[in-house]
């Protein structure tokens, strides 16, 4: 399983780490004190646990500066059967995780007994330009660098740079 290292600026690395959802009970306690109408920052740590923090928190702070199996934003909702994941993305410009991080993210939700949509509800395709080394988010399937026009590779490559 891939571990993603932080690729963002060093000045964003401070702040409190996220809360680890080590069990369904841990999630219940945490969400009871949170504003569940807002999206949250999440990472999946190297051990496979879901770490949650308020949306304004940087992913790297949420992760305590460590490598992660996945990262993005998540919203939760509740029905008669309890809490579930309403939306989840891989939107993290600090880690730029590939869409293939989904199984690790799904497994972390399942450890907290959270039902989920079965895939990212919002998927970002991150690539690093082999020409100018800038980070890109591929839009509308156009694999060309926004900054210099160089063709972007078919496979995730953000780690090389
Ligand atoms: Zn470029």
Image (cartoon, rainbow, N blue to C red):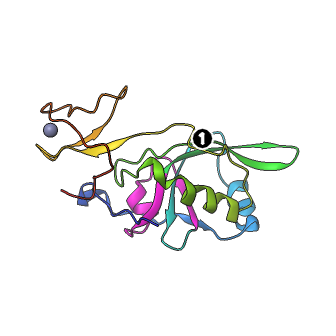
As drawn, the residue found furthest toward the bottom would be 47
Looking at the image, residue 143 sits to the left or right of residue 37; the answer is: left
Q: Which residue occupies 78% across, 44% down?
A: 78
In which image quadrant can residue 86 be found? top right
Residue 58 appears at what percent x and percent y?
A: 40, 54
Q: Is residue 145 magenta?
A: no
Q: Quick check: 11 left or right of 112?
A: left
Q: Is residue 65 left or right of residue 35?
A: left
3 or 28, which lies in front? 3
Quarter occupied by residue 108: bottom right
| Residue 83 on image: x %, y % | 76, 49
Q: Nearer the viewer, residue 149 or 26?
A: 149
Residue drawn 53% across the image and 74% down it: 47
Judging by the rendered image, the residue that carries numbered circle 1 is: 38
Which contiguous range is marked in magenta? Answer: 49-71
Residue 28, placed above or below residue 22? above
Quadrant holding the C terminus:
bottom left
């Amino acid at each position: 399983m891939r571990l993603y290292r932080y690729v963002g600026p060093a000045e964003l690395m401070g702040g409190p780490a996220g809360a680890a959802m080590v069990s369904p009970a841990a999630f219940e306690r945490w969400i009871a004190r949170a504003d569940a109408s807002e999206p949250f920052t999440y990472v999946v740590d190297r051990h496979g646990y879901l770490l949650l923090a308020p949306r304004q928190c940087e992913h790297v702070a949420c992760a305590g500066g460590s490598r992660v199996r996945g990262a993005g934003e998540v919203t939760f909702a509740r029905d008669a059967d309890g809490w579930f994941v309403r939306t989840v993305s891989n939107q993290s410009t600090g880690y730029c995780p590939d869409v293939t991080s989904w199984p690790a993210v799904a497994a972390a939700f399942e450890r907290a007994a959270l039902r989920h949509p079965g895939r990212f509800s919002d998927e970002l395709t991150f690539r690093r330009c082999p020409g100018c080394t800038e980070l890109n988010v591929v839009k509308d399937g156009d694999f060309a660098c926004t900054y210099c026009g160089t063709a972007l590779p078919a496979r995730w490559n953000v780690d090389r740079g």
